[in-house]
Amino acid sequence: MAAPLGLAAYRLATMAFAPAVPFFLRQRARRGKEDTARMRERLGYAGIARPEGKLIWIHGASVGESVSALPLIDAFLKSGHPVLVTSGTVTSAKLMAERLPAGAIHQYAPVDTPAATSRFLTHWKPDAALFVESELWPNLLHRAAGQGVKLALVNGRMSERSFRGWRRARRVADALLSLFDVCLAQDAETAKRLTALGARNVQITGSLKADAPPLPADETKLAALRNAIGGRPVLLASSTHPGEDETILPAQDKLRGEYPDLLTIIAPRHPERGADIAMLCGPRPSLLRSSGALPAADTQVYIADTIGELGILYRLAPFAFIGGSLVPHGGQNPLEPARLGCAVLTGPHTENFRQVYDAILSAQGAGLVGTALEIAAKAGRLLGNPSEAKAMGEAARVAAISLGGAVEKTIAATEALLDARA
């Protein structure tokens, strides 16, 4: 069957654009968006030899996808399979350097040009490739399928918004999704949408993130921050997006009427927004964690504009507001605080993790907020009733654990692909 016109045009465009790729990569490197020392990996040149044996390749676009795959990576290594992990961002590469199990290989994903993807696949020759969530690169997928690599979409998630977009390019979606030997969906809604767009073998496995171990924490840094905070009450807002800090700050203003020594900690989803949030604070005394400073007695807002430290923050606060939910983003991962017994507050936009939020909020019996006044009211109640906050956190933890099982199902599906490859 001939490729849809859109995919044919895409292939021609990426071929024409290929000579300019090194220039654009260098431009991105100047902005900190690329790793200068490993730039050749983005062009498909390997930075390390291929290991012997049946190689499992796992690709996650960025931090969230890469972290969710960690339990899978560990399980495959323990079963004797070599594992190659690719991601596309500097942030994810740094995190993988810290958290990948010994023996796993990390490389930057090649840019999606025919030449770069060909070099990458010719060197690595993976036996099975697992694409986490929804990262679909046409040249890479077609080249891998043509090479006989068994393909799986794992931890699949597709929002209604994404579904509407793909539906407008139905032939392209069908051509790409039909390349996968199996698609493992997080929930029934995603399974239905993938099937409607042309996926051939769709199974519901749940979310890999529910099987992830609790976020780690540097004990020295945790102790230092805990000591600096002392007995002050804490309002934590994590993974916030633009438009949400403007709601959190008025909520903290109202809370300070009842709790004058309140410390508000804001951890933006994108740490580079730290300076912008500091500007939003206006006359409120604020500090950036990236400066190396710990909160002082007069600090009202502590901006945690760093990477990989949510495990510290969730251990400090009895509850947390999880961002991406007051604006129409779809919500960030509530399993991370829940696994640490930190109760979850969220806005109404939770479609990215609808099943997970439903389970946690149902177990907690509360947690949905939509305005500064509602955040202040719920946070004030929990600050004034530590036993209630602790009970909600424990309910969230139990609910998070109950959602597990995706890793085992994904391993079984992958083993079936490797057997078919033989």
Image: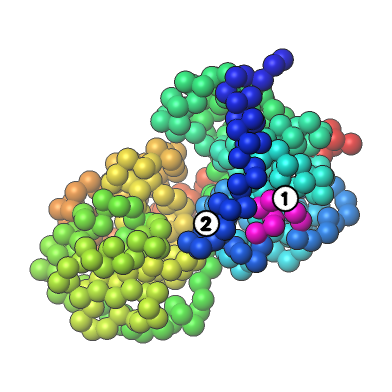
- Residue type of the residue flagged with mark 1: Gly
Q: Residues within 10 Å of mark 1 (few under 14, many from 20)?
A: many
Q: Is residue 181 left or right of residue 396?
A: right
Residue in view at x 41 percent, y 30 percent: 161
Residue 417's quadrant in the figure?
A: top right
Q: Which mark is residue 44?
A: 1
Circle nearer the N terminus (1, 2) = 2
Q: Which residue is mark 2?
A: 28
Q: Could you tell me residue 202's position as x and y percent? A: 63, 27
Q: Quadrant of the N terminus?
A: top right
**Which secondary structure lies at badge 2?**
helix
Using the image as rendered, state which of residue 243 and residue 211 is in the foreground: 243
Question: Is 388 rendered above or below residue 300?
Answer: above
**Which secondary structure lies at badge 1?**
loop
Question: Is 344 rendered above or below residue 309?
Answer: above
Residue in view at x 81 percent, y 52 percent: 81
Q: Could you tell me residue 366's position as x and y percent? A: 29, 48
Report the number of numbered marks: 2
Nearer mark to the viewer, of 1 and 2: 2
Using the image as rendered, state which of residue 409 and residue 102 is in the foreground: 102
Q: Which mark is residue 130?
A: none
Does residue 203 appear anywhere in the picture?
no
Give the Cα distance between marks 1 and 2: 17 Å
Residue 118's quadrant in the figure?
A: top right
Residue in view at x 44 percent, y 65 percent: 310
* Image: magenta residue range: 39-46
Q: Could you tell me residue 172's position as x and y percent? A: 58, 23
Magenta highlight on residue 45: yes
Using the image as rendered, state which of residue 336 and residue 165 is in the foreground: 165
Magenta highlight on residue 262: no
Residue in view at x 53 percent, y 68 percent: 216
- Residue type of the residue flagged with mark 2: Arg
